[in-house]
Amino acid sequence: MIKIYKQKDEELIFVSDPEKDCWINIAPPFNMEELESLASRLAIPFSYIVDCIDQYERSRYEKQDDAKLIVINTPILNEGFDMEDEATYITIPVGLILIPDMILTVCSVDNPLIEWFEKNILRNVHPKDRSHFVIKIFERNVYYFLHYLREINKRISQIEKELNYSSRNQELNKLLHLQKALIYFVNDIRANEMVLMKIQRTDFLNLADDNDAKELFQDILIDNSQALEMANVYSNILGNMMGAFASIISNNLGHVVNRLTAVTIALMLPTLVAGIYGMNVDLPFQHRTHAFTIVLIISLLSTAVFVFYFRKKRWL
């Protein structure tokens, strides 16, 4: 699906054909013939668009003639997008294609980064200002990494409370999915950082004469480094935590087995007394008037002695 946006009287409107200073957003579902035709009309290498659709495309940038390509990875919540990947959060590439008169964004799945720009772009920067447009995408992308890292930390804390009283593996599986997401975050934030640093060093966006843009770009690099550090810290904490809680689950399971064993023995004692007095032989108290009551008292006393002994030894 190809959406073409154009600024008109401080509003962002749809237009049917590409115009000067417009923003073209390419999102699923894809029609490869339409995309190839669009690339031909705009003199853009078709491989630029195809590469951005690839879910596993790495972060990078390149230039061919007047067309510039920047690919960065952005985080999304994995809500059925990739059923084979059990990570709670995954990263997907977002492609930015810059040509002299317009800018294109390409993504293989609908994501909050592009949706936010569709709703808020005019409050921050106009589509015709392509360099600032790209910088704002970088800024918002780092924001989503930091946002999801905080969400991961909250989920870890919630699962931690559940694990203190659990003897199941479901909570460990949840932690495993979060750890997998953190591994994706660490790798892709680091890759994004390398691309951003190269863009800054080579002045790929032509920001040499714009001090405000250069300062904002430097702030983005700092925030990206902070996100990388947070992801590394959470990943290390989570790795150590999973080992500790695996031991806790085993310990909880041992307590459950101890209790079940104690209950089994406690129930076995009255059964043993009843079994003995059920034999067809001469037994003590069998001719007394309160024989049943005596047998019942013996059963209860033997159980009480057992419970007292086990509690004293802290086995129960």
Image (cartoon, rainbow, N blue to C red):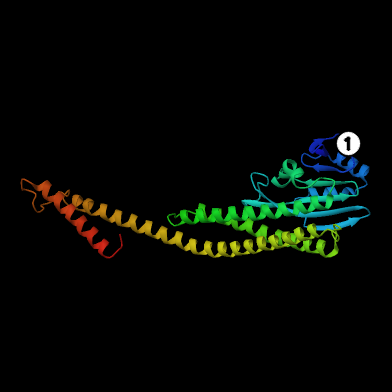
The x, y position of residue 263, in whole percent, is: 30, 54
| Rendering quarter of residue 310 | bottom left
Few, some or many C-alpha atoms within 10 Å of disc 1 (few <14, some 14-19, many ≥20)? few
Visible in this render: residue 109? no
| Rendering quarter of residue 191 | bottom right
Q: Quadrant of the C terminus?
A: bottom left
Q: Quick check: 188 left or right of 284?
A: right
The x, y position of residue 239, in whole percent, is: 57, 63
The x, y position of residue 260, in whole percent, is: 34, 54
Q: Quadrant of the N terminus?
A: top right
Mark 1 lies on a secondary structure that is: loop
Amino acid at dot 1: Asp
Vertical arrangement, residue 166 with respect to residue 225, above or below: above
Q: Residue at x 62, y 56 (%)?
A: 149
Q: Nearer the viewer, residue 227 or 314?
A: 227
Visible in this render: residue 183? yes
Q: Quick check: 313 left or right of 195?
A: left
Q: Quick check: 9 left or right of 307?
A: right
Q: Nearer the viewer, residue 80 or 116?
A: 116
| Rendering quarter of residue 80 | top right
Q: Which residue is mark 1?
A: 17
Q: Residue at x 80, y 50 (%)?
A: 133
Q: Residue at x 79, y 38 (%)?
A: 12
Q: Nearer the viewer, residue 132 or 110?
A: 132
Vertical arrangement, residue 127 with respect to residue 154, above or below: above
The x, y position of residue 283, in whole percent, is: 11, 53
